[in-house]
Each structure stands twice: as C-alpha cells, then as structure tokens.
Image: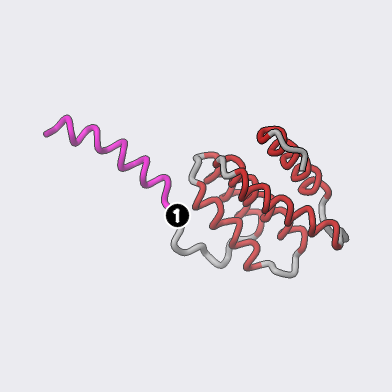
Amino acid sequence: MKALFLVMIPVLLLLACRTVPTEIPEDLGQAELIQLGQQAADQENWAAAIAYYEAIVERYPDERAAIATARYEIAFVEYRRGNLATAEDLFEELIAMYETDSSGLPAWPLVLSQRIVGKIHDQRGTNR
C-alpha cells in the first residue's frame, strides 16, 4: 500500500501541473498572459497555454499587435501538438490578417507563420 502511495504522488503532482486555469485574473497584462502561456506550452500544458492566449484576444480586441501575437501562439501550440490541419488553418488566417491590413502589426508573426506553413506543406508533401 505504501508503494502505491509513493507512486501516486508524482502522478498527482504531474496532473496538478497540467490544469487549465478556470479563472484568469483580470489584472494580468498582456506580457504576463504571454509569459503564462509560454510557461504552460513549455510544460506541454496545451489547454492552459491556449486559455492564456485566448484571454489576450478577448481582453484586448482593439490591440492588433497583441491579437497577432496571441493568434500566432495559439497556432504554434496546435503545430507543436501535431494538429497540422488546425495549425495550418490558424496560420493562414493570421497571414490573411496581414494581407488585409498590416498597419500596426509586428512583422515576426507573419514571417514565422509563412515559414511554418511551408514546413507543414513539406511534411505533407504538398505545394499548396
């Protein structure tokens, strides 16, 4: 019984680290939300990472640079998870955002999105 208990402790700790925040404090700024999203992604806690990035989209709807950053990060999480079709769709939506109006947007999300879409096509053997 003691051995089972000792085995269960690390499992429970691991599960606790992968929880999704049920409530994200309203006073967190963009930088803090991005940092929390990146920390969650580094721990492969994909749902939590997406929750933090979606909070940026919801809380800062008029800040195009923040939206571009969060949308890139969400797409990148899906790419890391191996959800290539979803990631490709999200990256292409972000690329389209730049094609419509790139004013006020940082260049890096566009460049990295295009690069990753190319990698996805290479992985699939397509030239879409």
- Residue 14 on the magenta segment: yes
**What's under tag 1, amino acid-wise?**
Val
- State the image coordinates of residue 80 (x, y, percent, origin top left): 59, 40
Magenta: main secondary structure equals: helix
Please identify the quadrant where the N terminus is shown. top left
Q: Quadrant of residue 50?
A: bottom right
Q: Residue at x 55, y 50 (%)?
A: 49
Secondary structure beneath dot 1 equals loop
* Side of 21 relative to 112 (left or right): left
- Residue interval drawn in magenta: 1-19
Point out residue 89 in the picture as x, y percentages from the top left corner: 67, 52
Observer-nearest of 13 and 92 = 92
Quadrant of the rendered image containing residue 123: top right
Q: Quadrant of the C terminus?
A: top right
Q: Is residue 39 left or right of residue 92?
A: left
Residue farthest along the top direction in this orientation: 3
| Residue underneath mark 1 | 20
Q: Is residue 74 magenta?
A: no
Q: Residue at x 70, y 33 (%)?
A: 125
Q: Is residue 13 left or right of residue 35?
A: left
- Residue 45 in the image: above or below residue 22: above
User: Which residue is painted at 80% across and 48% down in the image?
Assistant: 110
- Counting from the top left corner in percent of width and height, residue 90 is at 67, 53
83 in relation to 28, above or below: above
Give whichever of 92, 104 is nearer the camera.
Answer: 92
